[in-house]
Amino acid sequence: MRPGDPLSAKGSGCEPNRRVTLTSEGESVGGTTADNSGEFTATVEFVKIVPGRHIVSADCGIVLTGAVDQVVTSSTGGNSTTLVVLVFFVLAGAALIRVA
C-alpha cells in the first residue's frame, strides 16, 4: 500500500444482503452492504490520523475484527516537508460472534 491509496476492508461470513457497519473506537469509519454470498468490500475512512494500532469492527450479523496500524513519518528535502501516512489494514474473520 502506498501513501494516498484508498484503504478498504474485505470480509465474508455475513448474513446475505445485510448492512455492514465499520467502527473504530466508537466512531464510524465506513459501511456497505454484504452481497448475496455474505461477502463485502468497504472503504475505510478515518476522521483523523493517530499513530498506533486501532481495532476496526465490522458488524453484519456477526462481528469481524481487524487491526489498522497508522504510522506517520516526515522527511525533508530541499525547502519542503512531506508528511507520509502509511496505513495497513487486515480484517481477520477468525473471531466470529453471532448476534442473536
Image (spheres, rainbow, N blue to C red):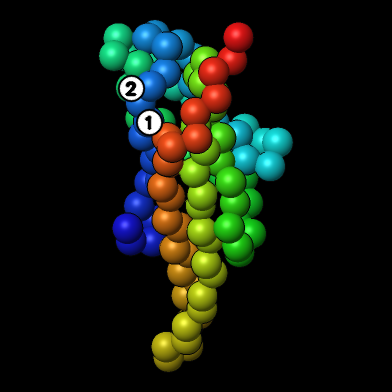
Q: Which mark is residue 78?
A: none
Of residues 97 and 34, the one nearer the viewer is 97
**SS for tag 1?**
strand
Label 1 packing within 10 angstroms: few (<14), some (14-19), many (20+): many
First in sequence: mark 1 vs mark 2: 1
Spatial separation of the CA atoms under disc 1 and disc 2 = 6 Å
Q: In the image, what residue occupies the spot 35% across and 26% down?
A: 12
Identify the amino acid type marked 2: Glu
Q: Which residue is mark 2?
A: 39
Q: In the image, what residue occupies the spot 44% across and 21% down?
A: 32
Find the residue positioned furthest to the right. Answer: 26
Residue 43 appears in the figure? no
Q: In the image, what residue occupies the spot 51% across and 49% down?
A: 67
**Where does the image place residue 77, in percent across and percent down from the top left?**
42, 88
Quadrant location of the C terminus?
top right
Q: Which residue is mark 1?
A: 11
Please tell me in which quadrant of the rendered image residue 1 appears.
bottom left
Find the residue positioned furthest to the bottom. Answer: 78
Residue 55 appears in the figure? yes
Of residues 99 and 52, the one nearer the viewer is 99
**SS for tag 2?**
loop
